[in-house]
Image (cartoon, rainbow, N blue to C red):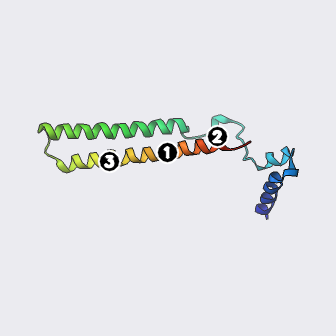
């Protein structure tokens, strides 16, 4: 029943004759925490920076493994291939996340207010 109420509120907001119904909009918004310091976990920016740093670390490790294999310091071909694949997969994942972020940003910019 609560879902029906929310759907009716949304429909009334979309109704062209329902202009100026700010109180209904307020009831649809999630509550904002009173104390912003109680929010736990890293921010989106920090999480993104940490992910990029991790991808870079995997690339550096793969480059080091390739250098060691090429110079003869290491004979671990499987470890080198594994390091290269880890770096490749993590880079591809990072690029897909970037594409999704850009796509979401473009969708927000197209949204008419």
Above/below status of 96 relative to 52 = below
Measured Cα–Cα span from mark 1 to mark 2: 15 Å
Few, some or many C-alpha atoms within 10 Å of disc 2 (few <14, some 14-19, many ≥20)?
few
Where, quadrant-wise, is the N terminus in this rendering? Answer: bottom right
Give coordinates of residue 69: x percent, y percent. Answer: 16, 41
In the image, what residue occupies the spot 20% across and 51% down? Answer: 78
Give the side of residue 57 with respect to residue 46, left or right: left
Give the side of residue 90 with respect to residue 61, left or right: right
Few, some or many C-alpha atoms within 10 Å of disc 1 (few <14, some 14-19, many ≥20)?
few
State which tag comes first along the sequence, 1 or 3: 3
**Helix, strand or loop at disc 2?**
helix
- Say the numbered circle drawn on residue 86: 3
State which tag comes first along the sequence, 1 or 2: 1
Count of marks, rendered view: 3
Give the side of residue 7 with respect to residue 109, left or right: right
- Say the numbered circle drawn on residue 99: 1
Where, quadrant-wise, is the C terminus in this rendering? Answer: top right
- Say the numbered circle drawn on residue 109: 2
Above/below status of 19 relative to 7 = above
| Nearer the camera: disc 3 or disc 2 | 2
Give coordinates of residue 70: x percent, y percent. Answer: 15, 39
Single out the residue that lies furthest toward the bottom: 1
- Say the numbered circle drawn on residue 108: none
């Amino acid at each position: 029943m609560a879902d029906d109420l929310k759907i009716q509120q949304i429909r009334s907001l979309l109704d062209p004759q329902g202009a100026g119904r700010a109180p209904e909009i307020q009831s649809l918004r999630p509550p904002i925490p009173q104390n912003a310091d109680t929010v736990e976990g890293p921010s989106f920016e920090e999480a993104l920076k940490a992910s990029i740093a991790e991808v870079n670390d995997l690339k550096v490790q793969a480059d080091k493994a390739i250098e060691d294999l090429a110079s003869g310091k290491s004979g671990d071909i499987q470890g080198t291939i594994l390091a290269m694949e880890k770096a490749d997969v993590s880079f591809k994942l990072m690029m897909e996340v970037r594409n999704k972020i850009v796509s979401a940003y473009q969708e927000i910019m197209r949204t008419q207010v």
